[in-house]
Amino acid sequence: MNWRVLALALGLLALAAPGHAACDSGLAGRLSARLHPDRLLDEERAACKSWPGQPGRSIVVLPLARPAAEPGATEFDLDVLVVQQADNGNTERSTVASRLFEPKVLLEDAARIDDIRIDTSRYPLAPDARAFGVRVRYSSASRALPYSSETLMLYAQQGERLRRVLGGLEVSMERGEWDPGCHANFEQLRSTLSVEPTRSHGFADLLLRRTRTTSRASFVDGDCIEQPGASRFDSVLLRYDGSRYAATAADAAKKIHAPR
């Protein structure tokens, strides 16, 4: 097996391992039983995390599976909650400060949802709006077409209101196509998202920087050799339109491309 294929395969195994996002205190299970008594919580993918800078508050994500219209696929409703913990730390007395329930947010088909993680990096979108992220990691077990991906959703809290302002943004990806005869192509995407000082409709603009790299493998003088291809960089400004972040047509046309 080509070393690049091996590295990607090991990466997929790491993604498939049980995540650290599980709610060990049982908080997710208790909230799900209270809010969704007739639904089955996917406890393996449920996520809980304390919110730095918000005393006594935690973020909880409850994934609730439902059959999809496509055979063999599963859809997930997501209930995203900001929870106020009791002063004594008793999670059984936790109260919901704000929440957003959305049906059919995630789809699991050929690519498996490995885990759901909460991102509490600083996303100060406005003086009265602070955001957190929910990251979803996917992978495919195909040996011929290995694939892994991570998407980011941003949720903004204003007072008691919780809204999703960015959805399904792919921030990392690795995929390949190969056969045992050392004929392979690989592509990798890496991204960063930063909060800018400029504003649109009262919310800070977001700058998305992405780097895409490619490589291919083939036999050279009897050896299986991987050869790097082009690396491309682009940046796009995401502006808030009053309800969601999106790249306008003008911003998309102003992408900066530079070989690396």
Image: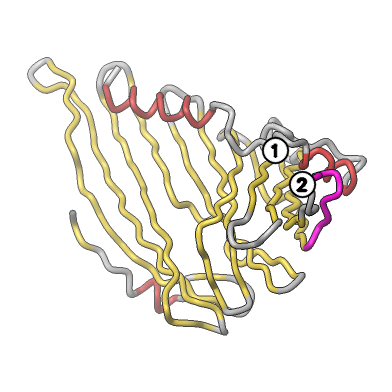
In the rendered image, which quarter contains the N terminus? top left
Q: In the image shown, does 169 or 194 lie closer to the viewer?
A: 194
Q: Which residues are magenta?
A: 89-97
Position of 163 relative to 212 (above/below): below
Residue 198: x and y, percent? 43, 82
Q: Quadrant of residue 153?
A: bottom right
Amino acid found under the numbered disc labelled 2: Gly
Question: Could you say which disc has been placed on residue 232 in the image?
Answer: none
Q: Is residue 249 above or below residue 187?
A: below
Task: Assign a secondary structure to mark 1.
Answer: loop
In this rendered view, identify the residue nearer to me: 62 or 148: 62
Q: Amino acid at mark 1?
A: Cys
Tell me how many marks there are: 2
25 and 8: which one is in front?
Answer: 25
Q: Are marks 2 and 1 in contact (CB under 8 Å)?
A: no
Residue 241's spot in the image, x, y percent?
57, 78
Q: Identify the residue under disc 1.
A: 23
Residue in the picture at 66% in, 36% down: 22
Q: Is residue 91 magenta?
A: yes
Q: Position of residue 31 (x, y in %)?
A: 83, 45
Q: Is residue 13 above or below residue 159?
A: above
Q: Which mark is residue 89?
A: 2
Let me know if residue 72 is in the magenta part. Answer: no
Q: Is residue 152 left or right of residue 225?
A: right
Callout 2 crowding tier (Cα within 10 Å): few <14, some 14–19, many ≥20: few
Give the x, y percent position of residue 203: 55, 78
